[in-house]
Image (cartoon, grey):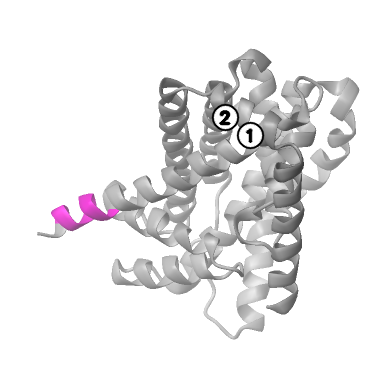
Amino acid sequence: RLVRLGFLAVALGFGGWAVASQWDAVAEGFAALSWPMLGGALVAVVAALLGAMLTWRTLLADLGSKLPLRPAAKVFFVGQLGKYIPGTVWPMLAQMEMGRDLGVPRARSAAAFFLMMPIQLATGLLVTLVTLGWERFGWLLLLVPVLLVLLEPKVINAVIGFGLRRLRREPLERPLTRRGMLAALGWAVAGWTCYGVHLYFITPDVGLVFAVAAFALSWCLGIMTFVVPAGAGVREAAMVVALAPVMDSGRAIAVALCSRVVIVVGDLICAGLAGIAARRDSV
C-alpha cells in the first residue's frame, strides 16, 4: 500500500509540476475547447464504456452466466468505480459480491474480471499497430504470437483451472470457448474506436485515425501500471508523448487532463444510469 501511494504521489506531483510550468499553454488549450466538443466526447466515452461492459458480459455468458443487460450493466459499471481506489482488487470484489446476488458464482465473476485485462491489452496494441503503422510500431508484431497464445481458450482454461486448484476452489462449470473469446475481442475493438472518437472530439485537428492510435497506446501503458488507481498520471503522460508529434506540450497536457475528466464523468454517468435502470426493474 505504501509503494502504491508513494508512486501515485510522485506521479501526481510531476503531473502538477508539468501543468504549472506550462500553465499559459495549458490554459490556452482549455480555452480552445467548446461545450459541443465536450458533449460529443462524453457521448463517445459512454459508448466506449458500453463496449467494455459488453466485453465483460460476453465473457461471463460464455463461462455460464448470461445476465440480462440492465443487471449486467449495474454490476459492471458500479463495480468499476472501485478502480479509483488504490489497489487492483476493489472492482473485482464489488463485481463478485453484486454478481453473487444474481446467482453468478464468485469464481466465474473473478475469471471474467481477470480476462478483461489481456483482452483490452491485446486489442489496444493491435489497434495501435494498425493505426500508427509498421514504421513506428512494427515491433509490436513481436508480441502478437505471445498474445495469440495467451488468448487461446485452451490456455486460458488451463491457467484458470490451475489457479482454482491452488486456491482449493471448485473448477469452472463451463470452459471458455473460442467463439466467446472472438465476440469479446470484437466488443473490445469497438470500445477502442469509441475512445478514439472521444479524443478526436477534444482535438479534431489531429485526425480520427491518429486520435484512436494515441488513446489506445496511452491506455495500454496505463493498464500495465498496476500500482496506481485507474492508471492516474501514467496515461496522461503517455498521451502527452503520443500527441507530441502533432501539437505543443502545453496543449497536449490540456487534452490529456480534459480526457481524464470526461472519462471520470462518463464512469459516474454509466454507474448512475445503470443503478437507476436496475432498480426500476426490481420494483
Left or right of residue 88: residue 270? left
Q: Quadrant where the C terminus lies? A: bottom left
Determine which of the numbered discs, if any, sits on residue 254 in the image.
Answer: 1
> Element at badge 2?
helix
> Is the residue marked by circle 1 packed among few (<14), some (14-19), or many (20+) residues within 10 Å?
many
Q: Residue 6 at x, y = what percent?
A: 74, 70
Q: Distance between the residues labelled 1 and 2?
A: 6 Å
- Whether residues under marks 1 and 2 lie with C-beta atoms below 8 angstroms apart, the answer is yes
Task: Name the residue: 22% across, 49% down.
Answer: 277
Which is more toward the observer, 213 or 126? 213
Q: Which amino acid does label 1 sit on?
A: Ala
Task: Name the residue: 30% across, 47% down.
Answer: 69
Task: From this view, report whether residue 8 is shown above or below residue 46.
Answer: below
Left or right of residue 95: residue 186? right
Q: Residue 209 at x, y = what percent?
A: 66, 18
Q: Is residue 271 magenta?
A: no
Q: Read off the residue under disc 2.
A: 30
Note whether residue 205 is visible.
yes
Which is more toward the observer, 36 or 219? 36
Determine which of the numbered discs, if any, sits on residue 114 in the image.
Answer: none
Q: Residue furthest left?
A: 283
Task: From this view, report whether residue 116 is shown above or below residue 128.
Answer: below
Task: Name the residue: 90% across, 21% down.
Answer: 135
Task: Name the residue: 42% across, 37% down.
Answer: 46
Q: Which of marks 1 and 2 is nearer the N terminus?
A: 2
Q: What residue type is labelled 2?
A: Phe
Q: What stretch is highlighted in magenta?
A: 275-281
Residue 225 position by quadrant: bottom right
> Is the residue marked by circle 2 packed among few (<14), some (14-19), or many (20+) residues within 10 Å?
some
Q: Residue 19 at x, y = what percent?
A: 70, 43
Q: Quadrant where the N terminus lies? A: bottom right
Q: Does the magenta stretch include residue 276?
A: yes
